[in-house]
Amino acid sequence: MAILGSSQDARADELPRPSAKAPRHRRTKVVDALSAWALVAPALVLFIVFIVIPTASGIGLSFYTWHFLDDPVFSGLTNFRTLVADPETWQSLGVTLKFVVLGVVPTVVLGFLLAVLTNARLRGVGALRVLYFVPAVVSVAVSAVLWSFIYDGRRGPIGALMRSVGLSSIDFLSTTTWALPALVVMMIWLALPVVILLYLAGLQRISPDIYDAAALDGAGSWRILWSITWPSVRGTTLVVSILQLITFVSGSLDIALILTNGDPLGSTRALGLYAYLVAFRNTDAGYASALSVLQLVVIVAVVVIGRFASKKVDR
Amino acid sequence: MRLGRLHLGRYTAITMVGLAIAFPLIYLLSGSLMSFQDISQYPPRLLPSAPLWSNYTTAFQYLTVRTIANTFLFVLAVLVIQLAICLPGAFALAKIKFRGSGLVFALFLVPLFMPTNLILIPTYVVSLKLGLIGNFGGLVLPVAGQASFGVLIFRQFFLSLPDGLVEAARIDGANWFQAFFQVGLPLAKPIIASYSVITFLTGWNLYIWPLVAGGDSPKTRVLTVALAPLANNQYSNLSPTIGFAAAVISMVPVLVVFVLFQKWFTRGVLGTGLE
């Protein structure tokens, strides 16, 4: 009430002097702009210093030869020539794509199915859903401590089970075949809660009428799932896929650095980790920057190809 | 009758799958109280033969109070700075018409779909030049500078407020700062809660940046950095069950936050989906 009353007062105050309106208006505009910039400035400054400048200088550095302590020397495309000729780059590129292919699709599909499973309006389901969200609180470091023991062939539970049925146990993280899939399983486990949650929100927006109509038409549950539910959450699928693409390209660095250091024989060393090792072990900042640029290109390419492919499927 | 059985089947499925997903964590909790003999025994035990609480004292001594305090300080500093910069910025971008606002907002959006690990090396370089490597400022500021998500969801929220609310305050004689503090901020409490829960969880679990910027020095070491060497348990002389206990200790604050504020966590995650 008080606000309403005073706003009327202000308007009454302005009425007798319409001529004063134009310059005042201009002044308000200046005040508006100044206030806005003052409010945005703190965020903008930190953002520019720690995000924009690093992004720009990361791309810039890829054209320099630099080892942190000496002076950067402009070297044109040298780093990129090294990159093309470096077999470890190609191996790391392959590992990155393996992380994406083995990780993203199962995470999205599994997350969707689990969301459908738990999307029941039954009493107590809300409490049970907490079980599904539990991995969300687990850090990469904690899960590394846990899963490195689970995967430990000599002492871990899987090894013990395998020996008990007469198989020889496998030390999963030290074989070129199993190390990457083992890391991916752990990453899927970590990523599921967010995916389930996003799909649950998507599912709850679907109108129940569609299901009723489909049921009347005699469609079975799988048919409904595939022809109605899945297409209805297409928007969520797109968002989730991009988020997971970033998670698997980016997260493979943390996990592999802790658990395998990229080994055995580079089989878990994705581009991110390779760039990290080149920068901080070989102190070759220029070449590492070129590798990061390649990583960016890969992400953009996968997003573009993914969008293109999903549009084709839609048609 | 048929309906009842259907529900029972659904309940059973939801419970079994849920337990399977939560199982590794249950195993971690149980294993943290086992002796080395217990955990490496066949058939694998689910519960310790006798709870070995000394695992926790050993783990606590390994982690040190300093590391735990560092982690709290790190996460809270990031959170406070992010709230202090993102809220007013988002308010201005949502409610004030000014030249350049579109451009500024677009700039903030760019990194949303770019993994932060991509700029890890140049961020290190910038922090090194600013003399921030090896001290607490270097740990906090680059993470606090990741303002994109905060600006985006707070702006979204302020856009949803009716313009009349802010205009009324303005006509009442409030300047934009007062309008922000007296009208915008109090209404933003729910979204601040969600954002804080998410930021707390992600900050607490960050690994690479604290490792690169702070490293293993006791002054800046955080829990994830202290835990990571325990993962390669073949090379550590500590029993894996002590590693489990250390992992559980490091999770207590996030578990508390998660249990107390689950509603806000859920809403916050939905915010990341750009609802």
Image: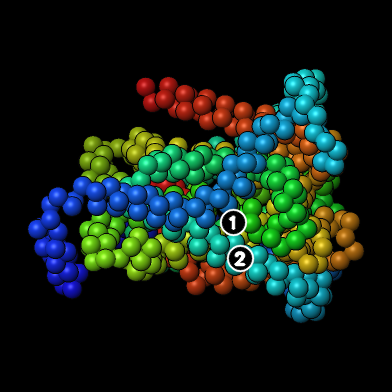
Above or below, A106 relative to B160: above
Residue B208, image x, y percentages: 71, 51
Query: Which residue is the site of mark 2?
Result: B77
The chain carrying label 2 is B
Query: Dot 2: what SS?
Result: helix
Q: Residue at x 26, y 39 (%)?
A: A214
Q: Are marks 2 and 1 in contact (CB under 8 Å)?
A: yes
Task: State which quadrant residue B172 falls in.
Answer: bottom left
* Label of residue A296 in the image: none
What's the residue at 30%, 37% (across, down)?
A219
Which residue is the site of mark 1? B144
Position in image of residue B165 (x %, y %)? 25, 62
Q: Earlier in the sequence, mark 2 or mark 1?
A: 2
Nearest to the observer: residue B219 or residue A250: B219
The residue nearer to you, when weighing A300 against A35, is: A35
The secondary element bearing badge 1 is classed as helix
Residue B218 found in image quarter: bottom right
Q: Residues within 10 Å of mark 2 (few under 14, many from 20)?
A: some
Q: CA distance from mark 2 to mark 1?
A: 8 Å
Residue A54 appearing in the image = yes
Front residue of this view, candidates B22 and B233: B233
